[in-house]
Image: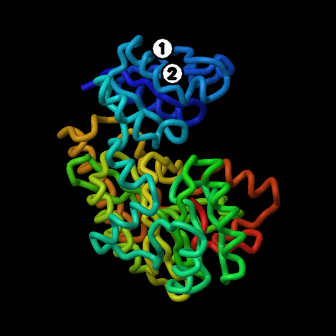
Amino acid sequence: MFDTVLIANRGAIACRIIRTLKALGLKSVAVYSEADADSRHVALADQAVCIGPAPAAQSYLDVERILAAAQQTGAGAIHPGYGFLSENPAFADACEAAGIAFIGPTGAQMRAFGLKHSARELAMQHEVPLLPGSGLLSDATEAATEAERIGYPVMLKSTAGGGGIGMRLVRNATELTAAWEAVERLARANFKDAGLFLEKFVEQARHIEVQLFGDGLGHVVALGERDCSAQRRNQKVIEETPAPHLARARDTLCARCVDEGRLAAAAAAAKADDIVDDHPVALRGRRAEHALRVRRKVVDRAFRAVAEDIMVEPGSPRRTLAVGKVADGVHREHQRGEGKAVGPLAEPVVDEHIERAFAAHMMPPHRRHIDGVAGGEVGG
């Protein structure tokens, strides 16, 4: 078991991890670029190591420098936070090879679920409900054939990356050729992977994400869900937990996501996406995208998931106990709220920064439609 954790990140997420480490009696190591020498996470940590100049490629994305910092400070584990190297399977493998615990999924798990088309294939093998879609497409001609089979409208999406980048709504065959060229170009430029596939677009729907936590040994629990339907240009604007008006669909939705988490042998935090029909409320299918290291503050605040994520090494008995502890807490809150709450906070939790942004722009916090963008099949 480690007693010192290096945080391979900066900013708010690094500060939150450091505070959690302190609460757990663990020592923290911050890394920083020359431009971030005066940042708050550097001041909060027990130790801090400069890992290079300002460009991320020469600091926060430099695996060798981060591993050297861990070895220099005696850190037994690395927490990647989100972004940067958090979903890089080679980094997870490098940590394992160096004898340093990677607080997150294994490289193999990232490879299985890191590409959307391969995640879909795995889910289909285990009969997980999915939106109609295609496999990896070779060219625009094959895309046209598959789109006719699926039925327009469809979403043309890059298999790599996320964050709403590399996806376009296609309503008819006339739009497909131009969409193919544009999305392929974006995917190659942003993710160094031009692989594309298709999924059915659901016009009136909600984007619901379920937060998962697992021990790497097949024990997985759902930490409730969040409604991410309010989006602009495929980017999430606001997230709310519990998701409103799910009624009896909530239990089915969470159970499906837990099953999929077991397929991936989730070893830390994960999230799974669902598309839910708005009229009436009904599950329309899954988006098989596991952003295994994406953290969402709105659920962290509701369930204190960061502490559980850091507590123990993946695959250890203590992580299994941590998963059980989380599950017990969720069960108690269900009882306390007489089934009306899905987490410690009975009232919906909204990220305060986003809440202020809405106020600043005098935009009503409507859940599903921002600038005329439907919350169906959008976002990463």
- Residue at figure coordinates x 39%, y 20% from the top left: 27
Residue on which the image places disc 1 = 47
Q: Residue furthest left?
A: 317
Colour convention = rainbow
User: Residue 273 location, x and y as percent?
Assistant: 46, 65
Viewer-closest of 70 and 16 = 70
- Residue at figure coordinates x 44%, y 80% from the top left: 283
Q: Secondary structure at mark 2?
A: strand
Is residue 355 visible in this depiction of the protein?
A: yes
The vertical placement of 96 against 221, above or below, is above
The vertical placement of 262 against 141, above or below, is above
User: Residue 274 location, x and y as percent?
Assistant: 46, 70
Q: Which corner quadrant of the image does residue 2 belong to?
A: top left
In the rendered structure, the answer to whether residue 155 lies left or right of residue 359 reads: left
User: Counting other residues with Cα less than 10 Å from the Cα at mark 2, is it few (<14), some (14-19), or many (20 or more)?
Assistant: many
Q: Secondary structure at mark 1?
A: strand
Quadrant of the rendering where the N terminus is positioned = top left
The vertical placement of 376 against 14, above or below, is below
Disc count in the image?
A: 2
Viewer-closest of 121 and 201 = 121
User: Residue 66 location, x and y as percent?
Assistant: 47, 22
Q: Residue furthest top?
A: 72
The vertical placement of 178 against 262, above or below, is below
The amino acid at mark 1 is Gln
In the rendered structure, the answer to whether residue 107 lies left or right of residue 242 reads: left
- Residue at figure coordinates x 67%, y 56% from the top left: 185
Viewer-closest of 82 and 134 = 134
Label 2 and label 1: CA atoms lie apart by 6 Å
User: Residue 262 location, x and y as percent?
Assistant: 27, 59
Residue 30's disc number: 2
